[in-house]
Structure formats: C-alpha cells, structure tokens
Image: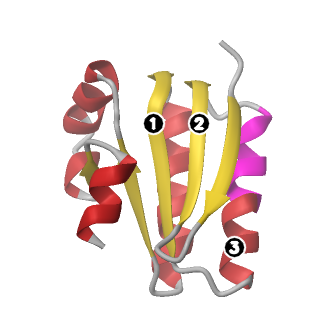
Amino acid sequence: MKLTYNTSKDDKANYLFIEGDLIGDEVGPKLVEIVSDAIQEGERTFVIDLSEVRYISSSGIGLLITILTKMRNVGGEVYLTAPSEHVKKLLIITKLNNIFTVYDSVDEFKSKH
C-alpha cells in the first residue's frame, strides 16, 4: 500500500499523519525534509501518528530514527501515536519503544503536554 501523509500544527506540536506502508520508499526523504523544514522554522516537537500504518520495514524504522535524531540534535523530541498491534510488536522487538515515547492517540499526547 502506497504511503501517503498529511501534516498539521498547533501550539503543542507539528503532526505527521502517515497512511500505508512505511518502507522508506521515495516518500521517505520527503518526510525527513518536512521535519528538517520544521526544525529550520524553530519547531521542536513532532508527533507521528501511526494509526493508519499497516507495516514498517527496516528502512521505515531507519526513517523514524533519522527523524528522531534530527529533532534530538536540536533539543527537540518526536512522539509516536496510535500504533497498530503489529507495529507495537515491532517497536518492542526493535526496542524502539524504549527510545520513542508512544501514546495511544494524538488526544492522549495533547492531554499530557
């Protein structure tokens, strides 16, 4: 399933809503560019909503780590929201659940920040 995305922003964070398979294809560099542009604009909090992501490949994991590294290098943070059971298991297997803060929903993130 081809990856598509939408972005939005409020006073708490920038939001990236991803839909499809996160496999680090040609859309991957565009996602990194979105984060890089936000950093240039002074943004320091990014929320990546995974509720519509079915599958993440090793390249997709690399993409998430690249985004996280870029944000942390400027004192920012990336949060993940609403991973499916399959994606949740992957985050646990790869120990990324220890690196990323994961919320059950965007609303839960907003209520805690």
Kindly report the distance in space between the C-alpha atoms of the residues bearing marks 3 and 1: 19 Å
Residue at 33% in and 24% down: 84
Residue 100 in view, yes or no: no
Instruction: For mark 3, give the secondary structure.
Output: helix
Amino acid marked by disc 3: Ala
Instruction: For mark 2, give the secondary structure.
Output: strand
Q: Earlier in the sequence, mark 2 or mark 1?
A: 2
Residue 105 vs 40, above or below: the answer is: above
Residue 3 vs 81, above or below: the answer is: above
Give the residue pinned by disc 3. Answer: 38
Pick the front one: 48 or 75: 48
Task: Give the x, y percent position of residue 27.
Answer: 76, 37
Q: Quadrant of the C terminus?
A: bottom left
What colour scheme does the image use? secondary structure
Residue 18 is tagged as 2
Q: Which residues are magenta?
A: 26-33
Whether 73 is among the magenta residues is no
Residue at 56% in and 35% down: 59
Neighbour class for label 2 at 10 Å: few (<14), some, many (≥20)?
some
Kindly report the distance in space between the C-alpha atoms of the residues bearing marks 2 and 1: 6 Å
Pick the front one: 93 or 14: 14
